[in-house]
Amino acid sequence: MIIVVKHVKAGDFAYVSHLDTMDVLHRTLKRAKIDVNYSQGFVKHMLTYATTPIPLGTQSVAEYYAVDCNGISAEEFLERFNENVPQDLRGVTAVAKPKNPNLAGNVVASDFLIKCKNVVPVEIEDIMDENEYVIDLNKKGEIIQKDVRSMLYSIFVDGKNLWIRSATGNTNLRIDSFVKHLIKVYNIDTTMNDITRLAQFVQLEDKLIGVDDYLKL
């Protein structure tokens, strides 16, 4: 049985790396005395699965952590998880599934809210009217140019708030890189810690569906 817990990543934990966060979650499962299944290889490890990590400093209210475990309901899992996990990684909901939903492979997009200290230029929305949109990206210390238009699903400006739905997963637009570009070009006043992932989505046929709804199928 797989229990998928939706959890936050906020506060000080926004600055904790993905690997270190996974270590904390593994220790949480041990403290909670949850019967987790292990791999059968030479170096055994817990059978747990996370979605695409967010950049360092970015916050989230929609991270997903799937655990292959035994003899526990989703409700009890969430209770014991929250009794042992740091508050900044607390669980929000938990769902039991008969097999791994493979969210790491199936998630294709995320919604982000970027809060700014100044009014966001509405012209940023015009990016969606372009056939291509090239930005500079830092790849292993080298600056490359990349057309990211196909990785943008939507952009919406409302006063000091900026909402972006962008590609996540196998095709991934790092939200921190894109926001750094917007800071440079449009002079928005924000930081990486002002970015929050609000939701993740999978694609079913020709439409996007939120992970919360996907897990109910």
Image (cartoon, rainbow, N blue to C red):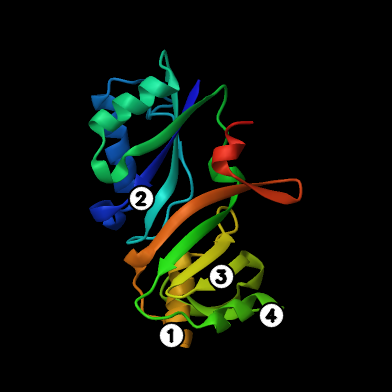
Label located before the other in sequence (1 or 2): 2
Q: At numbered mark 2, what does the secondary structure look like: helix, strand or loop?
A: helix
Please name the amino acid that badge 4 sits on.
Glu
Instruction: Give the x, y percent position of residue 76.
Output: 36, 20
Kind of residue at badge 2: His
Crowding at label 3, few (<14), some or many (≥20) Cα neighbours within 10 Å? Answer: some
Residue lying farthest to the front in this orientation:
159
Secondary structure category for the residue under label 1? helix
Q: Work out whether residue 110 can be spotted.
A: yes
The first of marks 3 and 1 along the sequence is 3
- Tell me which amino acid carries mark 1: Lys
Q: Label 1 belongs to which residue?
A: 184
Q: Give the mark nearer the N terminus: 4 vs 2.
A: 2
Identify the disc placed on residue 156.
3
Residue 217 picture quarter: top right
Badge 1 density bin: few <14, some 14–19, many ≥20, Cα 10 Å: few
Distance from label 3 to label 2 (Cα)? 28 Å
Residue 130's tag is 4
Give the Cα separation between the discs numbered 3 and 1.
18 Å
Name the residue beneath numbered marker 2.
18
Estimate how packed mark 2 is, as few (under 14), some (14 to 19) or many (20 or more) residues with alpha carbons within 10 Å: some
